[in-house]
Image (cartoon, coloured by chain):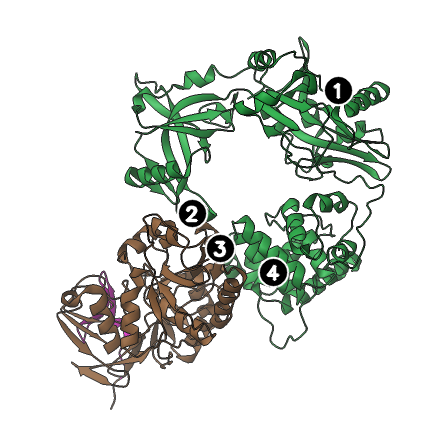
Amino acid sequence: MPMAPPNPDTWMRVTPQGLYCEPGDFFVDPLRPVPRAVITHGHSDHARPDHDAVLATPETLAIMRARLGEGRAGRAQQALRPGETLTRDGVTIRLVPAGHVLGSAQVVIEWRGSRIVVSGDYKRRRDPTCAAFEPVPCDVFVTEATFALPVFRHPPAEAEAARLLESVRLFPDRAHLVGVYALGKCQRLIRLLREAGWDRPIFLHGGLQALCTLYQELGVGLGELRPVPTPAKRGGGGLLAGEIVLAPSGAEATPWVRRLAEPVVCAASGWMRVRQRAKAKGVELPLIVSDHADWDELLLTAEQVQAPEVWVTHGREDALIHALAQRGVRGRALHLVGRGEEDEEASPETSVAEAAQP
Amino acid sequence: MSVPAFASLLERLVFTPGRNAKLALLRRWFAEQPDPDRGVGLAALTGELSLRAAKPALVRDLVAARTDATLLALSHDYVGDFAETVALIWPVREGVNAPPPGLAEVVEAMEVTPKGELPAMIAGWLDTLDANGRFALIKLVTGGLRVGVSARLAKTALAEWAAPRVVVQVDAIEEVWHGLEVPYRPLFAWLEGHGPRPDPRDAPVFRPLMLAHPLEEPDLVGLDPATHRAEWKWDGIRVQLAATAGGRRVWSRGAEDISAAFPEIVEAMDFRAVVDGELLVVRDGPEGKQVAPFADLQQRLNRKLVTPRMMAQHPVAVRLYDMLFEGEEDLRALPFDARRARLEAWYARTRPARMDLSDLVPFDSLDHLAAVRAGAREAAIEGLMVKRADSPYVAGRVKGLWWKWKRAPLSVDAVLMYAQRGHGKRSSYYSDYTFGLWRPDGNGGEELVPIGKAYSGYTDAELLWLDRWIRNNTTARFGPVREVEKALVLEVEFDAAQRSGRHKSGVALRFPRIARIRRDKPAEEADRLATVERMIVGGGPG
């Protein structure tokens, strides 16, 4: 006779390092080096260096190697493709696309008939650079809450790309400089621009080059990309009028920017929805393009996975837990430390320093 | 599609720091939008749209009925601005397929709709709009639109847009502007080349001002005492008083109607004329009428309404120096001397309250004039105006007719304390500098106290040098501001020092700018606060 499935609390715990699966003896996206880690995606607040064994999608492993260096992306790496299953000590693991960035995956973990899905970061919008999110019914759904307020309803990203192109037409004598995250946002925006018919070369700050090359190697076509040229003489400017330039967010405040022709400073981020945020950053053209679920998508996803219980890792958990309670779902804030640091606005100087200068 | 189109324009204007970019956005608006919406939009941007405003409580009630109270409170807390919160949180109603309202439609409906029907009407509009459109609509109907587009900038964009179809100077638009009504159809018809120049008739319109050039040493050579007149340059604000059959207006230098802030002046304009002068705070002193420092006048500026107490504590008057119209007669083509004679005769007959004439300062040689300038002690005197006796009254800054000869600036050697990144073209440069002077710290030592902020005066090369120095000598960061080593001395020039209760140092500088970087001078040898305190002349209340 089958036993009742165990309570999820009894086999998945929050520890200072992050979520820990006790019967499987592994962590998901741990904050500090651990013997065994399952990594949802390559952003630095999820993929930390120096674990012993790392399990992730092949794309995430490649991204980790590119960002952390061969020696620090896990002493032993094991790739698990979507659709494959791994069983260890009675615990089965599957990776299911999360739609966040290339390689991003939800971790579906089952033990004795109880199923927990750790979704990592995710979105539900179409993204031509990665596989779409698939809802998996479960007993506990572990979710982010980056944009968990009803004021966050992202407009269609295609319309935002069109606004950028419209601005390029309106100001042909100026360069358009778009601040983006190096992993994911950069490549998605490039694809959106290509789909909108922009077939001129797109110019990249040195800090974005490596991951774009990697995306292309992994089969994501990005069209012609060129490095931002160095001015002929030191301190020279006026370059790339009429062109689109992508750079890590924060580059607009560094001397590097002076080479560009009167740049229109743009930023592509879900935070651009809030005027004060855009104003404070000195952004002239805010583009609301997000790789996270918005409010409606968070609630839709919670409904589709049919979980009686939702654990919230980071973000605006109060609002989400309140709204879930109204729908009869028990919400719980995990208060994981160290999350949201790459996607939230890291201090501008830091994010540029991280990205190698050309 | 006009509220959404207006919302996109608004969105871009709000975030765009550059003047040229704003002009480009406005030109496109005029080119693409149909009447009457383009005119209504123009009025909304320049603050000339009068509209029966809805109370913010109306919007509050509408959103409260449609959202969860906890989520609304959390959202408001996060976003900050309530109108923006409402615009973002407003739930989309499925199945709404009514088109969004036109701008003119909104304005008209606000005027004629009975109060009880306003909530349903506004809610209906909000249902048809996206988040940006809702934001623009809420700001519009609650009267809270702040865009940062001056009327002058909008008129410049109009003139640029009209060319080369119709070649028209901004000042020509200025002259007809205040005789027009929203949505400005005759103006657009004129600028599109299929209508006559609108005639303001007897409206008290603004007439573009004649401006002065700064007088530099080489210019002195051409100044013949026989053909030039001198007056004191008072440190107030330039005003044009226009009183016609159509009404009375106090215009600022930038063609803003500031009548409401100075009702006592409007009351005194019991005449038919257009006169030019300086608005000052003037009090009775031991030696007769005494002009107060600019800081006193500041208490009266930028106010929509004025209390009797303000009017009593900061009484204003206008010192007149030119006359553009007497009755219907345009005097602007007359030479200065003839206009001055008309002004004096008119003043003697009319004797308007709260107004006097700016005295001519006699001089028989340039040395004499220079001595007069150097001898000026009053804080409210900025220097001298020198005007050619035969100059007509022409719009703008025509070289060689009117000169301003400011007093030699004051200066101190101050220590750079903080630097902030600029905006627009300067956003990658630390270009705004806060500097301080030494004072006793109460423990036998010395401390620096900030006395002002400057963001001009330096050359491009100096800006580059300062930017690099600041990046290399940062001790702390607060957002866009850096605190630096207290090691760099800047020579700061300013026009006057005034007492101030708002500054920690108790001193405020007028027009401070960076004159020189004193790399040769150690910070300890910079000036002390007492030095600048001794430069304060007269002084009103703090």
Q: Which residues are magenta?
A: A4-27
Position of residue B457 in the picture relative to residue A77 (left or right): right
The shade of chain A is brown
The circle on residue B7 is 4
Q: Which residue is mark 3?
A: A284
Q: Which residue is mark 2?
A: B427
Label 1–label 4 contact, CB within 8 A: no
Q: Residue visible at 42% across and 53% down?
A: A238
* C-alpha gap between disc 4 and disc 2: 26 Å
User: The disc labelled 3 sits on which kind of residue?
Assistant: Glu
Kindly indicate whether the residues beneath marks 1 and 4 are on one polypeptide chain.
yes
Kindly indicate whether the residues beneath marks 2 and 3 are on one polypeptide chain.
no
* C-alpha gap between disc 2 and disc 3: 11 Å
Q: Residue visible at 86% across and 20% down?
A: B349
User: The disc labelled 4 sits on which kind of residue?
Assistant: Ala
* C-alpha gap between disc 2 and disc 1: 46 Å
Residue A138 is at least partly visible in this image: yes
Quadrant containing the C terminus of chain B in the rendered view: top right
* C-alpha gap between disc 4 and disc 3: 15 Å
Label 4–label 3 contact, CB within 8 A: no
Q: Chain of mark 4?
A: B
Quarter of the image holding residue B282?
Answer: top right
* C-alpha gap between disc 1 and disc 4: 48 Å
In the foreground, A261 or B30: A261
